[in-house]
Image (tube, rainbow, N blue to C red):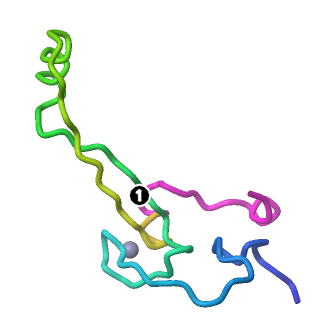
Amino acid sequence: MTKKRKSRGRSKGGKGRSDLVQCSNCGTLVPKDKAKKLTTRVGLVEPMLARELRAQGAYIATSRTLKHYCVSCAVHFGLVKVRAKDERRFR
Ligand SMILES: [Zn+2]
């Protein structure tokens, strides 16, 4: 059978069904191994102020937020790009 992608668009491998996660943007349900994961650090203090405080030796805590995106939202936000046909097989 011809294959479009080596991994079939997922990082599942030979294991069976995987859990579903909700897309952070559109809310659609996507398998966890197909969704694009994005970790961002969000500070409570504004960046300019945080830098000044850090220079004076203060510790500024940041919280880590984890987001899952479905493929179409990931493409829309530029997390992944559309690749040429012969380029898709790798990675
Ligand atoms: Zn989405």
Q: What's the amino acid at mark 1?
A: Phe
Residue at 49 percent of width and 76 percent of height: 32
- Asked if residue 30 lies left or right of residue 45, the reply is right
Residue 48, position as x, y percentages in the image? 16, 22
Q: Is residue 49 above or below residue 22?
A: above
Residue at 54 percent of width and 57 percent of height: 80
Residue 58, position as x, y percentages in the image? 15, 19
State the residue position of label 1.
Answer: 77
Residue 70, position as x, y percentages in the image? 45, 73
Query: Where's ligand 1: which quadrant?
Result: bottom left
Residue at 49 percent of width and 64 percent of height: 36
Q: Check mark 1 vs ligand 1: CB closer than 8 Å? yes or no.
A: no
Q: Is residue 81 above or below residue 59?
A: below
**Residue 11 among magenta residues:** no
- Asked if residue 18 lies left or right of residue 42, the reply is right
| Stretch in magenta | 75-91
Front residue of this view, candidates 53 and 34: 53
Q: Is residue 8 above or below residue 36?
A: below
Q: List the single residue furthest toward the top.
A: 56
What kind of secondary structure does the magenta stretch mostly adopt? loop
Q: Is residue 76 above or below residue 33?
A: above
Q: List the single residue furthest toward the right.
A: 1
Mark 1 neighbour class, 10 Å CA radius: few under 14, some 14 to 19, many 20 or more: few
